[in-house]
Amino acid sequence: MWIRSTLAYRVSLVMTVLGGLLVTGLDFVAIVLMFAQVDTLGGWTLPEVAFLYGLSAISFGLADLAMGSAGRLGGRVRDGTLDTLLVRPAPVLAQVAADRFALRRVARLVQGALVLTYALLALDVGWTPVKVLLVPVMLVSGGAIFCAVLVAGAAFQFVTQDAAEVQSAFTYGGQTLLQYPPTVFGRELVRGVTFLFPLAFVNWVPAAYVLDRPYPLGLPAGAAFAPPLVAGVCCALAGLAWRAGLRSYRSTGS
């Protein structure tokens, strides 16, 4: 329904997508400007940073397209309109994901794909079948990890009723963090996004294998192939958090 509504104004959609491409593209322009002054950033070259950027942008873009509307859940909890979703013969989480579905979010995917294409063409990497297959695995697993963060954030809003900004700190903030190499951040921060909130498995860890870089925190070589497992665990935990949050919902009482 929301896609049909959006396509009814195609010129508006095109203009919105182009505007989104311009806004999100400024992030990478800032990185390019940095490299106009330095040859490497934390020991990483521009194509290598572009590889990280493209992977994180596409992964987050997939999650934002699928579950980005979950950030509005707090408003529905506060005004009681979540009740209308509970009486419909469809999973509540699916309805939350489809609520006001914004097709314009494809702009982030397109922009990330353009940067990743540049990186793949500019990188001097000895590609093997394993490395080639690892790239789409990273994208799908990274998207699932970000989806889990979005769902967990939505579940948290059942309790707080107004935590959209907290959720954004771990989603938009996490995506921005992953645009840069781990070597520019403190060890404690890297440890936190590896073991506490495993965003490092979106791109830092598997990208280290592809680019023949040292693994963050000296992780074992097999960690590069852990993103699907990490994504599965994150989605399972997010699902449990969602079920607990939904069961705790008591409407507005009005």
Image (cartoon, helix red, strand yellow):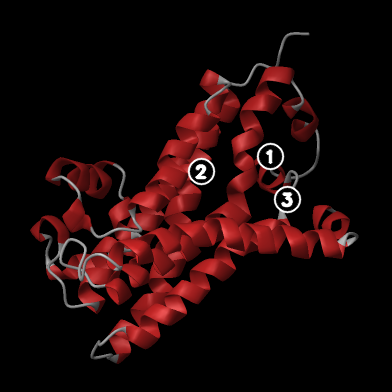
> Would you say the residues marked 2 and 1 are in contact, meaning their CB atoms lie under 8 Å apart?
no
Q: Earlier in the sequence, mark 3 or mark 1?
A: 1
Task: Give the amino acid type for the residue marked by disc 1 in the picture.
Answer: Val
- The answer to whether residue 252 is left or right of residue 26 is right
CA–CA distance in space, label 3 to label 1: 15 Å
- The answer to whether residue 138 is left or right of residue 245 is left
- Nearer the observer: mark 2 or 1; the answer is 2
Q: Is residue 58 visible?
A: yes
Q: Position of residue 238 (x, y in %)?
A: 46, 42
The residue that appears at 70% across and 27% down in the rendered structure is: 76
Foreground residue, 89 or 235?
235
Q: Is residue 101 above or below residue 51?
A: above
CA–CA distance in space, label 2 to label 1: 15 Å
Q: Is residue 215 above or below residue 120?
A: above
What is the secondary structure assignment of the residue under circle 1?
Answer: helix
Task: Give the amino acid type for the residue marked by disc 2 in the picture.
Answer: Leu
What is the secondary structure assignment of the residue under circle 3?
Answer: loop
The residue that appears at 49% across and 28% down in the rendered structure is: 156
Q: Position of residue 162 (x, y in %)?
A: 57, 22
Foreground residue, 44 or 166?
44
Per the image, the residue denoted by label 1 is: 92
In which image quadrant can residue 251 be found? top right
Foreground residue, 111 or 25?
25
Count of labels in the image: 3
Quarter of the image with the C terminus in it:
top right
Per the image, the residue denoted by label 3 is: 101
Q: Which mark is residue 4?
A: none
Q: Position of residue 18 (x, y in %)?
A: 68, 64
Per the image, the residue denoted by label 2 is: 150
- Nearer the observer: mark 3 or 1; the answer is 3
Task: Give the amino acid type for the residue marked by disc 3 in the picture.
Answer: Phe
